[in-house]
């Protein structure tokens, strides 16, 4: 299986570091963004296979809005989107899935579960 390109979007540096460490065993190219606008720009320019997207971010675009924007884009390949959030109420999860996320994962996350999810997304 060819190495994949994964965009990690989180405004907290420690979470980005945890994600990088967790995903390193996959051998994927890891791209980093710190806010929604940067995530949209990088997604359009770099065409990631997977996007791991924080829900609560500063700068005017939250993860739900970024997800909806990415799903509205029909001229580019459809990435597998994982919303990653500390917001774990049922209504938060439902909003994430309505926004077009393929999966909603709660923080703190399991690195093994995340890797397994990404590996399964590549075979789908």
Image (cartoon, helix red, strand yellow):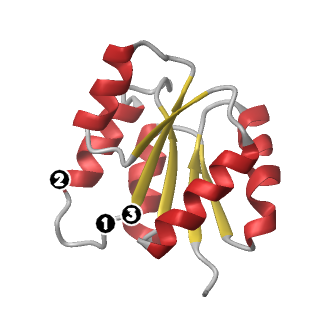
Q: Secondary structure at mark 2?
A: helix
Check whether the beta carbons of the residues at disc 2 and disc 3 lie within 8 A of each other: no
- Answer whether labels 1 and 3 touch (C-beta < 8 Å): yes
Left or right: 21 as drawn, with respect to 111: right
Residue 60 x/y as whole percent: 37, 25
Rendered image: mark on residue 72:
2
In primary-sequence order, the first of circles 2 and 3 is: 2
Residue on which the image places disc 3: 79
Question: Distance of mark 1 from mark 3, alpha carbons?
Answer: 4 Å
Circle on res. 78: 1
Residue visible at 36% across and 19% down in the picture: 92
Q: Is residue 6 visible?
A: no
The answer to whether the residue labelled 1 contacts the one labelled 2, judged by CB atoms less than 8 Å apart, is no
- Observer-side mark, 1 or 2, equals 1
Q: Is residue 69 left or right of residue 23?
A: left
Snapshot quadrant of residue 109: top right
Camera-side residue of 114 and 72? 114
């Amino acid at each position: 299986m060819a190495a994949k390109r994964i965009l990690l979007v989180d405004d907290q540096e420690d979470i980005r570091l945890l994600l990088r460490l967790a995903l390193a065993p996959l051998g994927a190219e890891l791209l980093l963004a710190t806010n929604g606008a940067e995530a949209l720009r990088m997604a359009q320019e770099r065409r990631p296979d997977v996007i791991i997207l924080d829900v609560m971010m500063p700068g005017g675009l939250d993860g739900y809005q970024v997800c909806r924007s990415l799903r509205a884009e029909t001229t580019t390949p459809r990435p597998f989107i994982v919303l990653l959030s500390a917001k774990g109420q049922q209504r938060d999860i439902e909003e994430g899935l309505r926004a077009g996320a393929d999966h909603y994962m709660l923080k703190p996350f399991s690195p093994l579960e995340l890797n397994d999810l990404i590996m399964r997304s590549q075979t789908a």
